[in-house]
Image: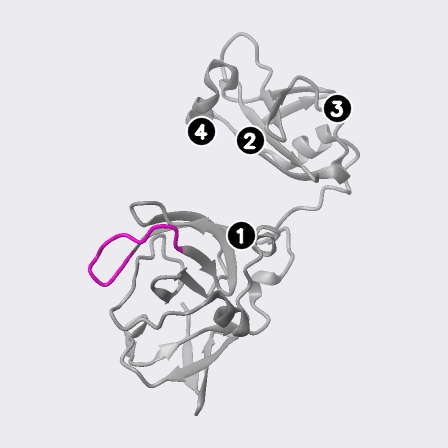
């Protein structure tokens, strides 16, 4: 549950749990919705030391999706999705739909469109947040949002919770420790659940298929994920035993 309190005179401070969001009030008729509270002013949020910027590999993530529409209910294309003040690198598609993973400690989900401005909603664990612009949305420039503390470098968001693999001795130890349901014996890797002939999983390193990953130094490892079952169908029969998607620091 997010607990909100509002204070301020010419400016505004909204406290969501223990996190403070600072902004400006424009006494216009642009609505800003916060749960069941209806506020008739323009709010531009600038996060002070947002919780999302904590670099913690144990941060729990949650899936969220939604649709972004204009005042007429028409989908917004290429709207930038923000988690608190951080741009996520996710943009809405032609149907106005977005999907992403966010830290569960996220407080605010926002969308920014050069044609429509900024619209925000409080995040309280919902799996779906739909954002709708109003007729009175103030048109904002990127420079305006930068002044209020919004960060347009998606790498800042992508680095949240990113693991540090430098403590592992080799790539095989990384896989053994990081993934359940995987058997690692020397340089042999088997993903449990696949019944077939060759049980060697497919390795995709920086977008290229490779047969040997032993030369990857954990220090150079940026991310690694495992696809299996229906998630690996994109790779056809070769991906049936599982697919490891490995990205190195380039």
Of mark 2 and mark 1, the one earlier in the sequence is 1
Q: Which residues are drawn in magenta? A: 69-79
Q: Is residue 109 above or below residue 175?
A: below
Residue 207, x across and y down, in percent: 59, 28
Q: Are marks 2 and 1 in contact (CB under 8 Å)?
A: no
| Residue placed most toward the observer, 87 or 129 | 87
Residue contact at pointers 3 and 2, CB within 8 angstroms? no
Q: Disc 4 or disc 1, which is closer to the eye?
A: 4
Around disc 2, counting alpha carbons within 10 Å, would you say few (fewer than 14), some (14 to 19), or many (20 or more)? some
**Quarter of the image where the C terminus is located:** top right
Prevailing secondary structure of the magenta residues: loop
Q: Whole-percent x and y of residue 195?
A: 49, 13
**Label disc, if present, on residue 226 of the rendered structure:** 2
Q: Which residue is mark 3?
A: 214
In magenta stretch: residue 155: no
Depth check, front residue: 137 or 126: 137
- Dot label at residue 40: none
Of callouts 4 and 1, the N-terminal one: 1
Check disc 4 and report the residue beneath it. 231
In the displayed structure, would residue 86 be above or below residue 212? below
Q: Say whether residue 63 is visible.
A: no
Q: Residue at x 55, y 25 (%)?
A: 243
Dot 4 and dot 1 residues touching (CB under 8 Å): no
- Mark 1 lies on residue: 60
Q: Are there few (<14), some (14-19), or many (20+) residues within 10 Å of tag 3?
A: few
Between disc 4 and disc 3, whose residue precedes? 3
């Amino acid at each position: 549950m997010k607990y909100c309190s509002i204070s301020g005179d010419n400016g505004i401070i909204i406290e969501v749990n223990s996190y403070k969001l600072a902004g400006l009030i424009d006494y216009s008729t642009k609505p800003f919705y916060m749960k069941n509270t209806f506020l008739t002013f323009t709010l531009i949020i600038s996060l002070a030391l947002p919780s999302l910027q904590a670099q913690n590999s144990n941060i729990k993530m949650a899936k969220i999706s939604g649709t972004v529409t204009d005042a007429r209910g028409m989908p917004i294309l290429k709207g930038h999705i923000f988690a608190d003040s951080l741009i996520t690198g996710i943009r809405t598609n032609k149907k106005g739909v977005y999907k992403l993973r966010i830290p569960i400690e996220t407080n605010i989900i926002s969308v920014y469109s050069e044609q429509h401005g900024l619209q925000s909603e409080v995040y309280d664990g919902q799996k779906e947040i739909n954002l709708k612009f109003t007729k009175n949305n103030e048109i904002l420039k990127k420079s305006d949002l930068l002044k209020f503390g919004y960060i347009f470098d998606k790498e800042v968001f992508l680095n949240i919770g990113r693991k540090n693999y430098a403590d592992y001795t080799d790539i095989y130890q990384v896989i053994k420790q990081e993934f359940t349901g995987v058997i690692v014996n020397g340089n042999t890797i088997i993903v449990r659940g696949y019944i077939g002939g060759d049980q060697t999983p497919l390795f995709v390193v920086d977008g290229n298929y490779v047969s040997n990953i032993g030369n990857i130094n954990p220090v150079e490892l940026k991310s690694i994920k495992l696809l299996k079952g229906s998630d690996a169908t994109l790779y056809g029969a070769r991906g049936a035993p599982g697919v490891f998607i490995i990205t190195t620091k380039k």
